Image (cartoon, rainbow, N blue to C red):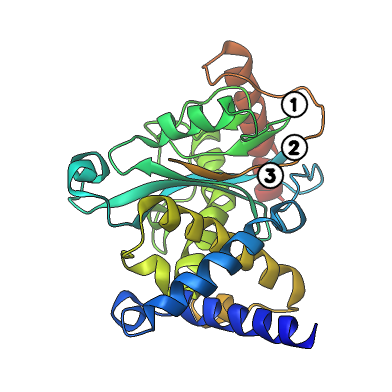
Amino acid sequence: MYIYNLSMYAAGFFFLNFILRDDYERRSLNERALARYCHRVLAAVLRLRNDLLAKPEPVPKIAPMKDGSGALDGTYIAVTPSASDRPRYRTRKGGLATNVLGVCTRDMRFIYVLAGWEGSASDSRVLRDAINRPNGLKVPIGSYYLVDGGYTNGEGFLAPYRGKRYHLQEWGPGRRSPQDREELFNYRHARARNVIERCFGLLKKRWAILRSPSFYPIRTQCRMILACSLLHNFIRMNMASDPEEFASFAKDELPVGEETINVVGTIEPSNQWTQMRDAHAQEMFTEFGNRHRH
């Protein structure tokens, strides 16, 4: 038992040392040891997904986005596909990457991660795939995730108003304050949704393996992305303060739990969802106006 535990400690140390390095440094490591240790620990980490993934819990008391469970977005992570697959993995900026869907809580823990889609795939296409998978993203009826303007404003996914200021840099010092309910809604939406961008930023800063393409097959590269997401959650769960947060300010998925609940099954615009967004916006603007009159 002592020998077995020592071997597992060594494997875990080797795996962490591996994902903390960039591609150039990883190539200097013993390749046989990589194959022996990394795949073993990778499989063990992925088996912990039900324990390490955050559970989506709406927080109605937190303004301004009532009943929201968190935020989602896509991000590119560099990969090394085979020569025949390169055209599909080429992004609009010319790089080779997988388009990774991430869903996170307000405290920057991942609820769901889907890696493996080609870099040429749109964010909305990846999301549609995620909600249609047997163990995919579950959005309980009555709740929603914050999404940016590239997604449909439909049941379960609350998007900003198009044609209005939205991105945080548009609200910097010297800029006008919100002029109407749509601008106020977009400003608060952008501040709340920014959590997923910060979460992706921390993930990539923490694990160097995500900042450069790997020499592993695509399948293994995507499993590495999922494992790094789980280890990110483990750190967030077990450290009083995250040093990285304060210092910087086929397809694989990490499925959510299998509870039987009524969930959103399609992503379609609807009058009901538009009216709900308008009601949110009007409530915010009324409260905003009352506060600034006194």
Q: What secondary structure is found at the residue carrying circle 2?
A: loop
Q: Label 2 crowding class (10 Å Cα cut-off): few <14, some 14-19, many 20+?
A: some
| Camera-nearest residue between 32 and 206 | 32
Q: Residue 33: x, y in percent?
A: 46, 79
Viewer-side label of 3, 2: 2
Q: What secondary structure is found at the residue carrying circle 1?
A: loop
Residue 117 occupies quadrant: top left
Q: Residue 9: x, y in percent?
A: 67, 83
Q: Residue 143: x, y in percent?
A: 72, 32
Q: Amino acid at mark 1?
A: Gly
User: Relative to residue 2, is residue 9 drawn left or right?
Assistant: left
Q: Amino acid at mark 2?
A: Asp
Residue linked to disc 3? 64
Mark 1 or 3, nearer chain start:
3
Viewer-side label of 1, 3: 1
Query: Is disc 2 in contact with disc 1, using a CB cutoff of under 8 Å?
Result: yes
Give the residue displayed 61% in from the left and 85% down from the top.
10
User: Relative to residue 232, is residue 58 drawn left or right?
Assistant: right
Residue linked to disc 1? 142
Mark 2 or 1, nearer chain start:
2
Residue 287 drawn above or below residue 8: above
Q: Label 1 crowding class (10 Å Cα cut-off): few <14, some 14-19, many 20+?
A: few
Quote the CA–CA distance across marks 3 and 2.
Answer: 10 Å
Q: Amino acid at mark 3?
A: Pro
Residue linked to disc 2? 67
